[in-house]
Image (spheres, rainbow, N blue to C red):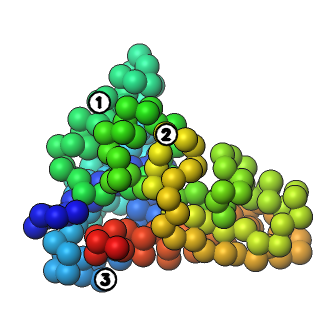
Amino acid sequence: MSGVNKNIVILISGSGSNMAAIVEAARVRHWQARFGARVAAVISNKVAAQGLAWASEQGIATAALDHTQFESREVFDAALMHEIDRHEPSVVVLAGFMRILTPGFVQHFEDRLINIHPSLLPAFTGLKTHQRAIDMGCRFAGATVHRVTSELDHGEILEQAVVPIIRGDTAQTLAARVLAQEHVIYPRAVEKLLAGG
């Protein structure tokens, strides 16, 4: 990731708590001064996503592309690609972006596209990860930051956090503790990419 400016584009669908953690890390850890890096834009597939208002308040460019207004997944992804490319990103961060992306989209941003998943991949790909971990009797859950490939929830693992499953945990209580760790490891993974490692 050479060049003076390293732009980060973050995609969200909801409150954007991981997005906010990354924006705060960029400020507190001086990514602009250290890496020439900044969060250039936050983009959502939902016009009413709460995270858009928060990002806008931080002075970050925002955009919303309502996926329901596009005739196909491919057409939506093409429009999304165009919107992202306007910011010339070094890193594209999926932060609670609840869309399965087309192979063309993934290929276009190859080696620049990362995601966070609420399990210790390769275990529990897909949805309902916390309940599945509890149902299987796992002693540990966690979160994984990984590069995005055309295969769902696969790709090189960049960071992981382990969270113990406590007796009496529900999917909701476990999810809350995992999310707290996501807010630690996602900024760390982005920073490592910016640093070239």
- The residue shown at (72%, 68%) is 141
Q: Is residue 93 above or below residue 79?
A: below
Secondary structure beneath dot 2 equals loop
Q: Of label 1 and label 2, which has the lower sequence position?
A: 1
Say what amino acid the circle numbered 3 marks.
Answer: Val
Q: Foreground mark, 1 or 3?
A: 1
Q: Of label 2 and label 3, which has the lower sequence position?
A: 3
Residue 41 left/right relative to 142: left
Q: Is residue 41 above or below residue 150?
A: below
Q: How busy is the neighbourhood of tag 1: few (under 14 within 10 Å), some, or many (20 plus)?
A: some
- In depth, the one of 49 and 112 nearer the eye is 112
- The residue shown at (58%, 57%) is 117
Using the rendered view, name the quadrant where residue 40 is placed. bottom left
Q: Of label 1 and label 3, which has the lower sequence position?
A: 3
Q: Foreground mark, 1 or 2?
A: 2
According to the picture, the residue beneath numbered tag 1 turns out to be 79
Figure quadrant of the C terminus = bottom left
x and y, in percent, of residue 170 in the image: 81, 63
According to the picture, the residue beneath numbered tag 3 turns out to be 28
Figure quadrant of the N terminus = bottom left
Q: How busy is the neighbourhood of tag 3: few (under 14 within 10 Å), some, or many (20 plus)?
A: few
Marking on residue 150: 2
x and y, in percent, of residue 66 in the image: 39, 31
Residue lying farthest to the left in this orientation: 4
Residue 99 left/right relative to 42: right
Marking on residue 53: none
